Image: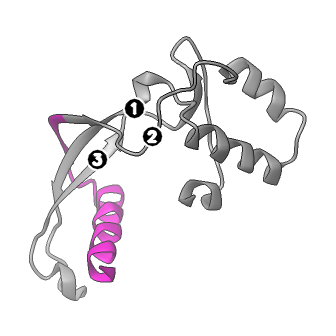
Amino acid sequence: MKRIFLAIVIAATTIVVFGQKAVLTGQTRTTKNLPARPLTGVMSGTDFIAMCDTIDFWPREKVIVHEVLRGNVPDSLRTLHQIEFTTPIVDSVEVLRKPHKIQLWVACDYLAIGYDEDFMRMPMGPLAAQE
């Protein structure tokens, strides 16, 4: 598992550093583990922005995780798109001594809180992103 993760990290870095071309395959799927948005008591993007102005970083991170895990994400960001790329051969990295085909499922935008008509693209710290 560590070798696969390392290969993905190296390959992703290669895309950025060497301009390796990633291909959008046209395949899509909806997110599996994101619950449906609750019908009541959900913050809009406007509400969320106002709340962010009143609290510090760590409490805000907890609210971000809470809102995302309860499904307060725009419908337009619930579809993942598949991209593919092939790693170049890198003699100095054992796992990349031969090319590997990498397939990733990605969202088309940053994570957002709210609904399609009123949302906020929400950056977060690494701990909140992992959670």
Quickly name the residue at label 1: 78
Which label lies toward us, 1 or 3?
Answer: 1
Residue 127, image quadrant: bottom right
Residue drawn at the location 27% of the way across and 53% of the way down: 19
Q: Residue at x 35, y 61 (%)?
A: 17
Disc 2, SS: loop
Name the residue tied to disc 3: 105
Element carrying mark 1: loop
Tell which circle, 1 or 3, labels the residue nearer the N-terminal end.
Answer: 1
Task: Please report whichever mark, 2 or 1, sits nearer to the chain's N-terminal start.
Answer: 2
Examine the rendered structure and indicate whether residue 65 appears above or below residue 51.
below
Q: Quadrant of the C terminus?
A: bottom right
Q: Is residue 70 above or below residue 131?
A: above
The residue that disc 2 covers is 34
Dot 1 crowding, Cα within 10 Å, few <14, some 14–19, many 20+: some
Quadrant of the snapshot with the N terminus = bottom left
Classify 10 Å Cα crowding around label 2: few (below 14), some (14-19), many (20 and above).
some
In the image, what residue type sits under mark 1? Arg
At label 2, which amino acid type do we have? Answer: Leu
- The boundaries of the magenta stretch are 1-27
Count all numbered tags in the image, as a single digit. 3
